Image (cartoon, grey):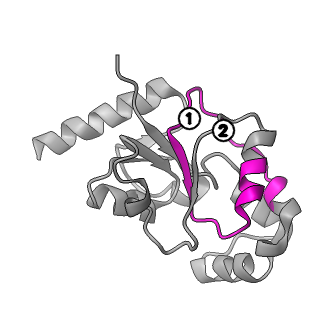
Amino acid sequence: MNKLRIGLDIDDTIAGFSQGYIERFGKFPKVDWAITRNVNNILIKEREFWLGLPLLRKPDFEPRLYCSCRINNKRWTKQYLNDRGLPKSPLYQIPGYHLSKAETIRGKVDVFIDDSVRIFEDLNKKGIPCLLIDSVQNKNYETPYRIYSLKYAEIEGVYNKLLTDKNLE
C-alpha cells in the first residue's frame, strides 16, 4: 500500500500561534496587516515566543515535509518541532504571509494541510490538493474538505473525497 505524502503547515495547524499571539498582545486583529506588522517588527526577535507556543495537534504519521510562512529564525522552528517530539522531516519556510507555498511543495507532497483559507484556495487552484484543518479563524468558511485532526485515516478519507470530486468536474 502506498502511503500518502502529506505536508503540514505549522502555525495553527500544529502550533497554537493565535493563542500565543493573544497571550502576547491581548487580542487577535481582524486584519492581516496588523498581525504582519507585529510579527515583522516585534515577534521576529522573540525566540521565547516561538519556542513557547502551545502544541495544538501532533500527527499520527510521518509528514513528508513542513512548510510555513514564518519569517522567524528557522532554527527556532526546528527546535520547537524537536522539543515536542514531532517527526523529523524537511522544513521549508516561505518568508512572508502573502507568498504562495505552491512552487516550494509542488511534486513533493500528495496533499497539504493548512489552516489558512487563502493558502487552501491557492494550492487547490494551482493543482496541489490541500485540506483545511479546522481553526477559529476559518470556522465560517464552508468546504467539504475540512479536517479536524492530524490522524492519517481522516486525512486519507477527505483527500479521497477531494480527488473523487475533482474527477467528476
43 left or right, relative to 11: right
- Residue 31 can be seen, yes or no: no
Examine the rendered structure and indicate whether residue 68 appears above or below residue 112.
Answer: below
- Residue furthest out toward the top: 1
63 left or right, relative to 127: right
Q: Which residues are magenta?
A: 50-79
- Residue 101 can be seen, yes or no: yes
Q: Amino acid at mark 1?
A: Ser
Q: Residues within 10 Å of mark 2 (few under 14, many from 20)?
A: some
35 left or right, relative to 128: right
The structure residue drawn at horizontal position 36% and vertical position 40%, both measured from the top left corner, is 110
Q: Secondary structure at mark 1?
A: loop
Question: Quadrant of residue 40 in the image?
Answer: bottom right
Q: Closest to the observer: 53 or 139?
A: 53
Q: Position of residue 153 (x, y in %)?
A: 45, 23
Examine the rendered structure and indicate whether residue 143 appears above or below residue 100.
Answer: above
Q: Residues within 10 Å of mark 1 (few under 14, many from 20)?
A: some
Secondary structure mostly seen in the magenta stretch: loop
- Badge 1 is on which residue? 149
Lower position in the chain sequence, tag 2 or tag 1: 2
Verify whether residue 64 appears in magenta: yes
Q: Position of residue 158 (x, y in %)?
A: 36, 34
The structure residue drawn at horizontal position 38% and vertical position 60%, both measured from the top left corner, is 102
Q: Position of residue 81 (x, y in %)?
A: 72, 44
Q: Secondary structure at mark 2?
A: loop
- Badge 2 is on which residue? 57
- Residue furthest out toward the right: 48
